[in-house]
Amino acid sequence: MPQLLILALSLLPWIPAFLCGGVTTVEEFAVLEGKSLTVPCHYEPQYATYVKYWCRGRMREFCSSLARTDEPRSAEDKVSIHNDPVQLVFTVTMEDLKEEDSGWYMCGVEIGGLWSADVVAYTNIKVIHGLSVVNSRLNGEEGGSVTVQCLYSKRYRESEKKWCRSGDWSSCLQLGSEGRYEDTSVAISDDRTGTFAITFKKLQMRDAGWYWCSVGQQHMSVHVLVTPTATTTVMSPATSSQPVAYLTPPMHATKESGNSHRHILESLLVCASLMVLVGLAVFAWKTWKQHKSHEQRRMEWMKIGLSENSEEAGDLQNSAVVFLNKNSPNGHMY
């Protein structure tokens, strides 16, 4: 019994952290090697003046401290922390990430005291190497421009980089030693820090389709959609009496009609649910009433049976029994 009491008391400080959710953050991040990452940690208003910290690990007692709001940051530190009490969030930035930086991290608010545990939140950071794109589906207007950003990890800085139209190997454009390529329709540049960008200068309808950017043996697909230029038709002055026709964008009625249909469906579901509940209530009431009626009939039959039995018993009490003795001519009555 004393051991259970001690265990319960030791768990008391952790109850507010689990029930109140004092700190929240994103559960998982994936970032390319060599890139930086910023993690937002949101907290409740009552913790605005408390010290915030960032550490590596999943247990506070064994968590390696990396940054605190009450400690200045040195120039060589890869980790920085910034608190914004107005927005109730503190952000942690990790720079030049490597694969060995992958793991569990904790952002927390230091409460202090024997009976008060820190409020914390955990996140898992995965540092990967390879290739990714900022946006795998892009669209632009005919005659305009659009830029594709292909991101690569640190180990691919010196690797060969290409931009190709999917299904047509002869269309591949390769960056030169200076990290640039440009012609009348497209411009490609590599910043040598992890990004090479492809810009379509003047989009044409034939530019629409699938492409891929490659770094070494890594490939990522990108889809480019080109929409026609919106045209305006103006009638000549000679026919000024006729109305001027403009090509207007499509009405945004889909969302509204969808919302209307959704509201109608919700109303129907509510009505149907109410009808089902009413039906169940009526059924239950009728079942109870029938059961009660059967019980009353059974009780009446039992009363009738008891009354008949009592009458028969009375007749037996009032009747006389005559015993005849075969040796005596006279009988005896009782």
Image (cartoon, helix red, strand yellow):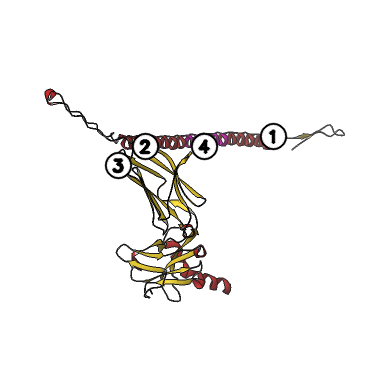
Instruction: Return the residue at label 2.
Output: 262
* Mark closer to the observer (4, 2): 2
Q: Amino acid at mark 4?
A: Lys
Front one among 205 and 286: 205
Instruction: Look at the numbered disc 2 and give the secondary structure of its residue.
Output: helix
Q: Amino acid at mark 3?
A: Gly
Front one among 205 and 275: 205
Instruction: Return the residue at label 1.
Output: 319
Front one among 74 and 236: 236
Residue contact at pointers 1 and 4, CB within 8 angstroms: no
Instruction: Return the residue at label 3.
Output: 144
Q: Earlier in the sequence, mark 1 or mark 3?
A: 3
Residue 108, given in percent of the width and then of the height, sits at: 42, 67
> Which circle marks residue 292 in the picture?
4
Residue contact at pointers 2 and 3, CB within 8 angstroms: no
- The magenta segment is 283-299
